[in-house]
Amino acid sequence: MAVSTDLACQDRGCHCCLFALLLAFLTVSEYRPAAQETLDIKSGDTKTVLKEGSSLSVMTWNVGYGALGDNADFFMDGGKSVQTADTARVNQNLTGIADEIKSVSPDIVFLQEVDINSSRSHDIDEAETIETQLQAANAAKLSNSTLAYNFKVAFIPYPIPPIGKVNGGILTLSNYSIESSDALCAANTFQMAGEIRKSQTLPDGRQDPSKQRGRQCIRQVSGHGEPTSGSVR
């Protein structure tokens, strides 16, 4: 009995040590972006410059890392599954996303929840996959891009089985040349909202109507729904 108790204590101690090591690893490897980061720009064949007064079409879409299709039973949405799509289904969804973008044919696309080599999407580089499919149809369309990470975790240990590694971000695709691109990182959404409001305020305290028009024309999508598009002048 004494031997069994000692072994049980050793097992608990071993588990505690492993858990402590995991916490230490996650703390050290935690993604801590700067308040403002300059992003790499991928320039394609299109060198078109957007001129003042021109009209353009904009599309925004939360693509649910290519795995939250109509078959998904995701645990965070009240379902039971962690892995909601196999490799073939993720690739099928990515093809559908690219096809929808091609059918809408926008000038600028904002895609959220795009994974790059994440466990939950079977280590597929979704940004590269979508861009390749779009350029295969027309190399001159949407060939300029930037990617900003907003979810970068070496390992998420929950639930069972665990989510694992996640590298997700926001992909911007453009028909027009991109001169510069920066990611602004706020400690919380309220801080970011405050910064946006300040950027829309004129020196005399009035709201800049041109900024307000732009904000109203580009509608955001909540959740993993259908793409939203619109025209902005």
Image (cartoon, grey):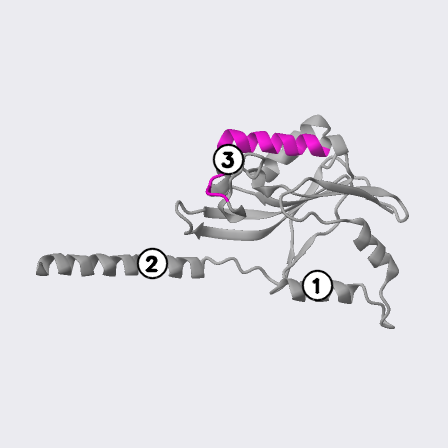
Callout 3, which amino acid?
A: Ala
Callout 2, which amino acid?
A: Phe
- The disc, 1 or 2, on the residue closer to the chain's N-terminal end is 2
Checking the image for residue 193, the label placed there is 1
- The disc, 1 or 3, on the residue closer to the chain's N-terminal end is 3
Does 95 appear in magenta? yes
Q: Residue at x 87, y 73 (%)?
A: 204
Q: Residue at x 49, y 46 (%)?
A: 75
Query: Which span is picked out in magenta?
Result: 79-101
Residue 161 in the image: above or below residue 27: above
Residue 1 pos. (x, y %): 9, 58
The count of marks equals 3
Q: Is residue 43 visible?
A: no
Q: 10 Å neighbourhood of mark 1: few (<14), some, or many (≥20)?
A: few
> Alpha-carbon distance for marks 1 and 2?
37 Å
Q: Is disc 1 placed on a helix, strand or loop?
A: helix
Q: Is residue 16 visible?
A: yes
Q: Is disc 3 placed on a helix, strand or loop?
A: loop
Seen from this angle, which residue lies furthest right? 53
- 203 horizontally vs 29: left or right: right
Callout 1, which amino acid?
A: Ala
Residue 30 pos. (x, y %): 48, 58
Residue 193 pos. (x, y %): 70, 63
Checking the image for residue 85, the label placed there is 3
> Alpha-carbon distance for marks 2 and 3?
29 Å
In the picture of the structure, the residue carrying the numbered disc 2 is 19
Q: 10 Å neighbourhood of mark 3: few (<14), some, or many (≥20)?
A: many
Q: Are marks 2 and 3 in contact (CB under 8 Å)?
A: no
